[in-house]
Image (cartoon, coloured by chain):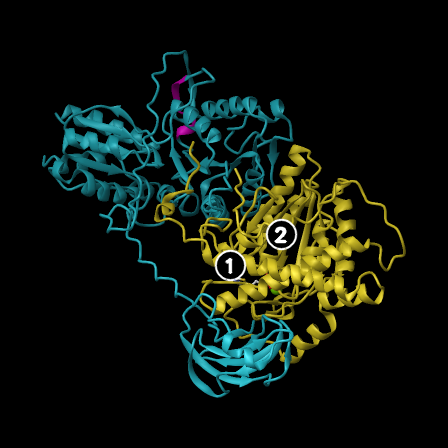
Chain colours: A cyan, B yellow
Amino acid sequence: MPTQVLMPALSPTMTDGKLAKWLKKEGDAVASGDILAEIETDKATMEMEAVDEGTLGKILVPEGSEGVAVNTPIAVILGEGEEASAINEAPAAPAKAEAPAPKADVPAPKAPAPTGIPAAPATPKAAAEPDYTGETRPMTVREALRDAMVEEMRRDETVFLMGEEVAQYQGAYKISQGLLEEFGEKRVIDTPITEHGFAGLGVGAAFSGLRPIVEFMTFNFAMQAMDQIINSAAKTLYMSGGQMGCPIVFRGPNGAAARVAAQHSQCFGSWFAHIPGLKVLVPYSGADAKGLLKAAIRDPNPVIFLENEILYGRTFEVPIDPDFVLPIGRAKIERSGKDVTLVTFSLMVETALKAAEALAEEGIDAEVINLRSLRPLDTETIVASVKKTNRIVSIEEGWPTAGIGSEIAALMMEHAFDYLDAPVVRVAGADVPMPYAANLEKLALPQVETIIEAAKAVCYK
Amino acid sequence: MATAPKSATGAAKAPAKRKTTPRKKGGDDKAPFSTPDLLRDYRQMLLIRRFEEKAGQLYGMGLIGGFCHLYIGQEAVVVGLHASAAEVDTLVTSYRDHGHMLACGMDPGGVMAELTGRVGGYSKGKGGSMHMFSRKVNFYGGHGIVGAQVPIGTGLGFGHKYKQDGGVCFVYFGDGAVNQGQVYESFNMASLWKLPVVYVIENNLYGMGTSVARASASVELYRRGDAYGIPGVQVNGMDVIEVRKAGEKAVAHCRAGKGPIILEMKTYRYRGHSMSDPAKYRTKDEVSKMRKESDPIDNLRAFLLENKLADEDALKEIDRDVKSIITKAAEFAQQSPEPEPSELFTDVLVDA
Ligand SMILES: Cc1ncc(C[n+]2csc(CCOP(=O)(O)OP(=O)(O)O)c2C)c(N)n1
Ligand SMILES: [Mg+2]
């Protein structure tokens, strides 16, 4: 049967164009790949190639014609042994390009969904936190992190650790002490200083079924690896329709250290929390560190595990049972109170707890929530707290613009508006690169006093 | 886990994959490969060519959106190299990935349906032309960021070594991608740790509109591993027999535990960089000379006929067969429905 040649679109936005020139005449033999004609738009000239084989039976649109609509039949090709008289039988344009219906811009999932557009599913509730009744021991966060890795590496052969100085040097911050000795150089791997490269290599290893723990000496250097973390680790599951899980943990110290200035002091919590396809954990205590790192290693998704250098040396009671694992996505109420909610994470939990003590002396009973996870965020726990206290202050080291506090403020508007007796107040790092001078550095970070002031402000005291 | 999409084109056969044991070679050096091998190459290359022509046509009809990068002209590279791949081996490439998927034995209907954004596509319509995967055949994408597949493939090689499964990873990237920093980060680690990776530089002379000479301080791309002690070979990537030979040697090198190797495949793309590229940066003569003199399919066809390894009828039969597979693939790609709106929120995370 003769086949029609249709006016092609050179780009998704092209609606019509000029048929500038025919390069074949009626009666010419055509093979697939032969150039039939030249098409022009205001932007470009392109050659149009034949897809079907046969003879150019008839030219329907002469050269020089302007404004030829996309998908208009412009010629007919006859198959082997077909006569020109068969042209009238040429099948209609195959499946007239029903211009793919322009997709409605999908609104932010939480906005009320217009009909036809699915609402984002509610974040599945994290498993309840089991009451741990087993033995605990005082240990540093540093040791708790090491134990988490050791236990998981004993449990699963596919878990390995890679990063700069993690093996022979035992970790720049001594987190991987003893690991090389126990697991050998196959599973505890010193990398060259090549963040983008080893992050990508880790992603490939995770695709291949291994469970890499990739240590960044600090998260400041993960900026070099941002593309692999976001474009490869976080998005590939979705882009593959669910085939390509990426079970990988990126871990290391995050946030302000002491006196190391702008390039080595920054909280990346809100950066990573922005990305669908990642989980983002922010432990505070030794139990958090151990229980959450074990959960991260077992999780089938890419997990960003943000530690804090100052917390490494702090000592906490830590469960020693190797089966102790914390659920991902559950905040912890570190101190319960009825007058104001202080919601925060990582090192700032410590600062907030100090502020709560001071507030208690002034007759303000503060509740302190340790988020532990920024994605998924335990909105339910925050909302439940605000229903009780009716006032909330968010605290973070990171910058205020588009920060975690901004997210919490928006969530309170959406979920707890009727319970608020005062606007949400955000306490955040100063909106400047971190200064070096001791006095300026202190001014740039939230202090106990800043939190006290903010808490009093929302209590109108 | 991997669910290969069902389509009407089940007819497409996965190319026979050899086990790792080297096959005996008979005959002279000119044709060290058997006739069935060469007929398979012919069929595979033609399948890719016809698939891409059809994709171009569907794009012209508005059925395929966004970026669509065709592989026409470069078919011999992936077909010739993949002949050396064993079942356990892995492959990863860029966005110019349709040919690689077909060479891996993925279903043309499933690939085409992904191009049209339909649920029957390999990524259920959520990945598109540049992002497709199949765990079943160890095809790891399909990556839209120039060069990103290089560390990923190095990690797949790392996985082969860690698991001691004897596998090799084939990492394909372009002459433009070769200037990305992460490529050298990967070379360094692969050589340092002796990872079984074949780095295939598909030098089609242009990265979008920029010729190699305008982008690369040294145009001897096969030597880009010199600083890392990685051997490199330049190969006529328009000749499937030459590619096959180079592939066998490279794979043997990796399987022997000697670490990575670089193959620079000199090749050429006939079409624009993507569908909307008017290709003003090269002359028509350059393109037509390549097509006339170096076309990998025409040349293999002539070789088969001249050496009486196949007759016209046998080749015509293959042509017809391929054509009908592609017709069915295109039909499937248009009939398969768009994904359900509820698919919007699936596959973001694996259920823990
Ligand atoms: C990191 C990055 N930069 C730029 C682009 C845009 N881009 C897509 S393809 C391309 C050219 C790549 O050329 P080459 O590596 O030679 O591959 P070819 O297209 O020739 O197969 C560019 C610049 C991109 N996708 N990713
Ligand atoms: Mg190129």
Q: Alpha-carbon neighbours of circle 2 within 10 Å: few (<14), some, or many (≥20)?
A: some
Q: Is residue B47 left or right of residue A10?
A: right
User: Residue type at mark 2?
Assistant: Ala
Quarter-of-image position of residue B40: bottom right
Q: Is mark 1 within 8 Å of ligand 1?
A: no
Residue at 40% in and 45% down: A261
Which chain contains the residue that carries disc 1?
A: B
Note whether A310 is above or below A202 in the view shown: above
Confirm whether the magenta stretch covers residue B90: no
Disc with the residue nearer the chain's start (1 vs 2) = 2
Q: Nearer the viewer, residue A125 or B28?
A: B28
What SS does tag 1 mark?
Answer: helix
Above or below, B67 against B102 in this view is: below
Q: Position of residue B50 (x, y in %)?
A: 61, 63
Dividing the image into four quarters, tell me where ligand 1 lies.
bottom right
- B87 vs A322: above or below: below
Residue drawn at (52%, 21%), measured in percent from left and top? Answer: A151
Indicate the position of residue A20 as horizontal and vertical percent values.
Answer: 50, 85
Report crowding for label 1: few under 14, some 14 to 19, many 20 or more residues within 10 A (C-alpha).
some
Q: Residue at x 50, y 32 (%)?
A: A173
Q: Which residues are magenta?
A: A311-318
Name the quarter where the N terminus of chain A is drawn. Answer: bottom right
Mark 2, secondary structure of its residue: loop
- In the image: residue A118, left or right of residue A67: left
Q: Position of residue B104 (x, y in %)?
A: 64, 49
Q: Which residue is mark 2?
A: B12
Residue at label 1? B331
- Say which quarter of the image contains residue A203: top right
